[in-house]
Image (spheres, rainbow, N blue to C red):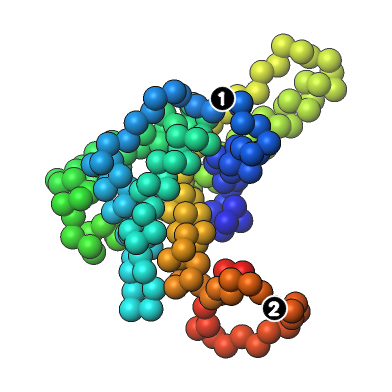
Amino acid sequence: MALLLGGTIIGAEAFLSGCSAPDKKIGMAGLNFSPDDISFLDEVGETILPATASSPGAKEAKIGEFMKTIVNDCYEEKDQKIFVDGLGELNDASKKKYNKGFLDLSADEKHAFLVDLDKEAKDYVKKKNDFDKQQNEKEAAAKASGNKAFKKEEMPAHYFTMMKQLTLWGYFTSEPGATKALRYVAVPGRYEGCVPYKKGDKAWAT
């Protein structure tokens, strides 16, 4: 997923280490998402991964609830703020372009709007990756020269990158996503290193 989206998955490290570090404090205490926020995130997720004749959409995977859980439990405070502020930024961008909020857009308008927003986010990620590389090089040079005063700067993540990452992550690891959008075998049999594939076949979840 990181390769697909052009960057690291925000919150994944905390998610993977959660069982071994139960006392580690992540993010802001008492961060709340209203039912309207969850519905808004469901709609964003459904626009990214809509229901089709052969597979359910992100709403069926309760993607808004998944986003809330990961942002609350796994995001650092700086990323939580970006994500929460991003709800308003996305809606404001919709109003600026269409003179109406995201939820009031037609399905086609929502799709076109998020396609443009996705391009904006991808361009931003490229700049962020270049910036991070430069900062890493400066940090290495500072360490080599014994400069202990150097402090690495950071570019914040793009809020839509977070929403898209969480949509894909949550959907394809959910029961509906894994069993209906992908092919799933609850108890795999023997290992087969070469399985015939026909164009159009679903990918395997297991």
Residue at the far top: name it. Answer: 149
Whole-percent x, y for residue 98 in the image: 17, 50
Q: In the rendered image, is residue 48 in sight?
A: no
Where residue 37 appears, x then y in whole percent? 28, 41
Left or right: where 61 falls relative to 133: left
* Residue linked to disc 2: 189
In this rendering, the answer to whether 159 lies above or below 187 is above
Measured along the vertical axis of the image, is residue 120 above or below residue 57? above
Identity, as a three-letter code, of the amino acid under mark 2:
Gly
Is residue 103 rendered to the left or right of residue 58? left
Viewer-closest of 127 and 11: 11
Judging by the rendered image, the residue that carries numbered circle 1 is 25
Label 2, secondary structure: give it.
loop
Residue 63: x and y in percent read: 38, 53
Determine the image quadrant of residue 171: bottom left
Near-viewer residue (170 or 5): 170
Q: Residue at x 48, y 71 (%)?
A: 179
Residue 177: x and y, percent?
Answer: 45, 65
Which amino acid does the dot numbered 1 rest on?
Lys
The earlier-in-sequence mark between 1 and 2 is 1
